[in-house]
Image: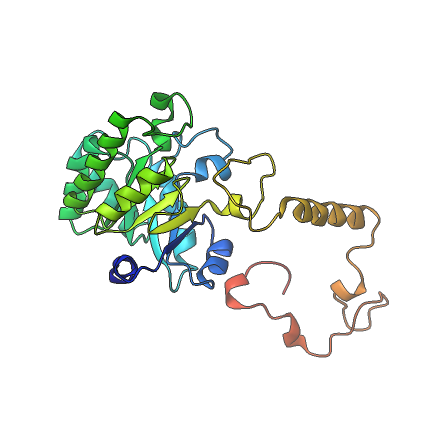
Amino acid sequence: MPDILARKRDGVPVVMITAYDATFARLIDACDVDIVLVGDSLGMVMQGHEHTLEVTVDHMIYHARCVRRALRCAHLTVDMPFMSYQASPDLAVTNAGRLIKEGGAASVKLEGGAQVLPAIERIVAAGIPVMGHLGLTPQSVHAFGGFKVQARDAQAAERLRNEAAQLEQAGCFSIVLEGIPAALATEVSASLSIPTIGIGAGNGCDGQVLVMQDLLGLDDSFKPKFVKRYATLADPVRDAFSAFAAEVRSRAFPGPEHSFASKNSPVAAAPDPDPNDHAEPPRRAGYGPR
């Protein structure tokens, strides 16, 4: 946590990427990323829903535990899903505690401003670090009438400024600013002593976050303006699956080099000079023949 706060002081942008499983978490953790977020965006990118509202605390714990096992360096933040904190501060601190104890989170993230201040204060008082989230908050998608840019008029912009200050005062260690005008995000960031992390909020925030699937280009049907694709992996992934299917049907795979032979077997297979060649690393134990 001190390292993340120091980024603001030193003028070094904070880097945050979402992850939902151990494989990608391990890859991200090797790339000097400050924060890995297990977002309730998993409802859309992992579960196939059109929004995040069906995600539960148990879902978040499951994915957080998967990610936690792979992380060695990055800070792990986990989203509190819809209705896990809105009903009461007591419910909020109970569910935040579950995400820490059962999920292995180092901090939790809540969406909203003034209406969630009591929940934030209660969670912080329990010793759990909290990341705030203002602007386009996906759990309020129905109230917003869809995924639309927020705080474009003067009144809404002033409310966001005030709520950002209130979140800092309530004890948040950082705030995500999503889907707001770039100039407003820059102004809010300059007014706070805690780092802001932007997504669709311009270059003036103290850091940036993207959903992993978006920055990797794994969903070529999703092309919002705020996303930059650092790779376009949908096509090569499809090509790999298609190649596998074709080789299975043509019996080109598995070949001798992928097959095992018994002693004195008449079946041609690649030689096994060292039986230890087939020993599996501990983290993959249980997959494939031994």
**Which residue is pictured at 58% across the width and 45% down the height?**
217
Residue 165: x and y in percent read 18, 41
**Which residue is pictured at 42% across the width and 28% down the height?**
147
Q: Nearer the viewer, residue 191 or 287?
A: 191
Q: Nearer the viewer, residue 289 or 143?
A: 143
Q: How many marks?
A: 0
- Residue 97 makes an appearance in the image: no
Residue 34 horizontal side relative to residue 118, left or right: right
Residue 6 horizontal side relative to residue 284, left or right: left
Residue 15: x and y in percent read 39, 55
- Residue 236 makes an appearance in the image: yes
In the rendered view, would you say 130 is above or below 262?
above
In the rendered view, would you say 156 is above or below 38?
above
Which quarter of the image is occupied by the N terminus? bottom left
Which quarter of the image is occupied by the C terminus? bottom right
Residue 197: x and y in percent read 34, 47
Residue 250: x and y in percent read 84, 48
Residue placed furthest toward the bottom? 273
Q: Nearer the viewer, residue 205 or 109?
A: 205
Instruction: Report the colour scheme.
Output: rainbow
In the rendered view, would you say 283 is above or below 237?
below
**Which residue is pictured at 35% across the width and 47% down the height?**
204
